[in-house]
């Protein structure tokens, strides 16, 4: 059973990211310790479209991966609750990344993350990014809970 949706204010309570690097707009589904679905509304106003690519705008794959990591991190923090106050979730690894279809202005990117394993502070997720029913990207993302940069 999924918990209720988390809006942008709730996401900003879960993650330290802010504009222009906060790359998710809403969590539409969240099952603590299991899975989440996040949305990114891709608009022509995104700063990266100025240079990627003029006349043929495409969302950079590295930012799709970052959006996957942000949905994964939000799931970790949501699942742990107050236990993570003052800590950060750092992106550790990306494996088996594949880019299948371009993500364009006007698309709604739907990011599905599912926990594969969790050992102590390290979490691993299977991630997919879709537009409508089309698989655009997939990867395995590993993250770690830390005390933050010193």
Image: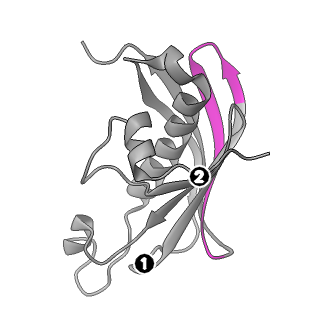
Could you say whether the residue bearing mark 2 is in a helix, strand or loop? loop
Residue receiving disc 1: 104
Q: Residue 27's spot in the image, x, y percent?
A: 55, 52
* Image position of 26 (left or right of 119): left
- Quadrant in the picture for residue 53: bottom left
Secondary structure predominantly adopted by residues drawn in magenta: strand
Position of the C terminus by quadrant: top left
Residue receiving disc 2: 5
Position of the N terminus by quadrant: top right
* Image position of 52 (left or right of 37): left
Which portion, as a residue range, is magenta? 117-132
Above-or-below relation of 120 to 24: above
- Quadrant in the picture for residue 45: bottom left
Q: Tell me if I can see residue 113 in this picture.
A: no
Label 2 environment density (alpha carbons within 10 Å; few <14, some 14–19, many ≥20): some
Q: Which is nearer the N-term, disc 2 or disc 1?
A: 2
Observer-nearest of 32 and 9: 9
């Amino acid at each position: 059973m999924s918990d209720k949706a988390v809006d942008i204010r709730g996401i900003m309570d879960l993650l330290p990211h802010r504009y222009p690097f906060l790359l998710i707009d809403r969590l539409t589904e969240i099952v603590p310790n299991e899975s989440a679905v996040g949305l990114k509304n891709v608009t022509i106003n995104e700063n990266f479209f100025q240079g990627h690519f003029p006349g043929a705008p495409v969302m950079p794959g590295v930012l799709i991966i970052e959006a996957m990591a942000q949905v994964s991190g939000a799931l970790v923090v949501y699942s742990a609750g107050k236990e993570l106050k003052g800590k950060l979730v750092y992106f550790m690894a990306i494996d088996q990344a594949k880019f299948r279809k371009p993500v364009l202005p006007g698309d709604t990117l739907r990011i599905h993350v599912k926990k594969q394993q969790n050992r102590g502070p390290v979490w691993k997720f299977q991630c997919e990014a879709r537009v409508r029913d089309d698989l655009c990207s997939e990867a395995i993302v590993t993250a770690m809970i830390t005390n933050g940069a010193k």
